[in-house]
Image: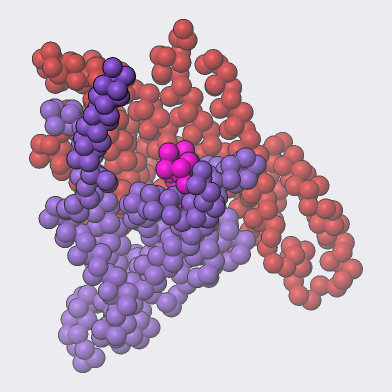
Amino acid sequence: MTEQVASKKEEEVLAELDSFAELPDAPPKRKFRLSWVGWLSVGIVVFWLLICVIGPTVAPFHEMDMEGDDSFLDAYSGEYGTFYLGTDYLGRDTYSRILFGARNTIGISLAATLLAYLMGITLGILAAVKGGWIDMGISRVNDAILALPTIMLGLIVIAALGSSIPILIGTAAVIYATSVFRIARALGQDIMVQDYVEAAATRGEGIWWIIRAEVLPNAAMPLATDFGLRLVFVVLFISSLSFLGLGVQPPASDWGSMVRENLQGLTYGSYAAIWPALAIASFTIAINLIVDDISAKSGGSLAKKMV
Amino acid sequence: MMTQMVFQRIGIGFATLMVVSIIVFLATSILPGDVAQIILGQSATPESLAALRTELGLDQPGYVRYFNWLGNMMTGDLGISKAGGATISSLIGGRLGNTMMMAGWVAVISIPISIALGLWAAMHPGTWLDRIVTFGTLSLISVPEFFIATVAVLILAVELHWLPSTAYMTGNETFVELMKALAMPLITLVIVVSAQMIRMTRAGILNVMSSPYIEMAILKGVPRGRIILRHAFFNAIGPIINVIALNLAYLVSGVVIVETIFAYPGLAKLMIDGVQTRDLPLVQACAMIFCATYVVLILIADVGSILSNPRLRNPK
């Protein structure tokens, strides 16, 4: 009798194990599918990143060359060469300056975003893993910085230290590290209470092993999507400061300062201020569309389909 | 429970303001070199430098200076501008009014437009008009404020000659003249703020739309318009109040750009001029005003969403 029960239980257990065997070990990999708008946006972003690298070599003029005789000319072909987008307020080639400026605008923003991620993730995971006083301390300072308008923080720092490229990168990195910290900390806390982390800790794995092998891989995907959005914010922040005359300093070309310099040309019908503004817009809109496309694919609820 | 939460939020808001004042004070006092040297120039004698330092209180330790500064600021003594030597309160006075007037008009115009458009888009998701609204607002929030301002100048001032491209004010205009001067900055700011508000209103409504009771309403055949207006809207009011307060707070950065472009005599323009001439007392005062406004608006957003939640308002 007892044997029978035992064997029946065994059967049940085996059947259960069989049904487990049918389950995949890991969820199937989500296919990376984008709509045509998404692919177009990827194309635009890749194009600008490429220009960052090769821009200065393909530009027909140097960013500081004053080739034309006159300022605010429309596109024309003259004795000095072809000015595809006309000239700016000092008679420099707008097209070349946009190609040169990509390096400053996108380069500085990328550097700042990467630095923000490095700081934000390190401190965020540290706060999540260690908890206690370390978490409290970092979080309170973080909240205070986060509670201020970014442009105000930027203005205060630049009023105190003046403007240079390292200061721009550092300021933007610290400001935007606060939001990365929040996300990294929340993700870290979520992951730290999962069974697999507990299992690893019980196994006797050290804290660094757990961070490297369990926490970081699981936090990577959400952080990657956020990177895109953060980069957009940083580009807008840096170009706004440049536009105010407090960012990248002349004569270096930068899309934000190019708009500022050529603003007065608008009244003469010159588009020299519009082209760099369009360059910024194309880059930031494209990134936002990619992020939007990815998050639209991963979401989806009954109401969205039904209504 | 609710009053406790509200008071807790107010406490946090106050603590944030204190930290903000420390940040502003520290950031502006780490300036390399010393203020007395800057005021008197390189050729100053050591005696006159020492005398000025005592006069300005620079020989006292940092925390004493901080509390002096904070105390003065709270009693309305904002100090003296380095450029020109006028008192900062007199510089700020009229400018603050101008900026508040602009922000007020932006709020009055953009809030109804945004809620109407956001609701409308949420009522017709997936239609081509909704797509235009969604794509349009996404594009608008991804571009810098100065892009919108530049395009507005190009179209309305340069091509159509409808409006002046600067917001020059003498102080004694008629209402029509005033509106004409204000039009360009107002249009720019309304576009910037509305784009964000429309998106957040639409998302707020669609978020409520995915809750079980809406599903129930859909399944029992309630028309879509009725679901949104009677079921979803009232439950989304909390998030929407939040959105409005947050966006009025975002106005702070929009105002900085727009006042610069249109040479509007507001507080932000004053502050930018201060940053350019590195007039630190002026920058400190303006930064504190902007940050305090921002913190208070965020606080209103927080408290608003607590008050609009019936579960918190009527505890069991």
A298 horizontally vs B54: left or right: left
Can residue B258 be seen here? The reply is no
Find chain B in the image and tell me its colour: red
Q: Is residue A190 above or below residue B212?
A: below
A183 in the magenta segment: yes
Residue A124 x, y percent position in the rendering:
51, 49
For image coordinates 25% across by 84% down, the residue present is A58
- A266 vs B51, left or right, is left
Residue in view at x 64 percent, y 49 percent: B23
Magenta stretch in the rendered image: A180-200
Measured along the vertical axis of the image, is residue B168 above or below residue A101?
Answer: above
Chain shown in purple: A
Residue at 14 percent across and 32 percent down: it is A305
Q: Depth check: give the residue in front, B44 or B138.
A: B138
Direction right: furthest residue: B47
Query: Residue B204 in the image: x percent, y percent?
Result: 30, 30
Residue B154, magenta (yes or no) = no
* Residue drawn 17% across the image and 15% down it: B217
Question: How far across and down, in percent of the image, does residue A216 sit?
Answer: 43, 53
- The quarter of the picture where the N terminus of chain A appears is top left
Report the magenta stretch's main SS: helix
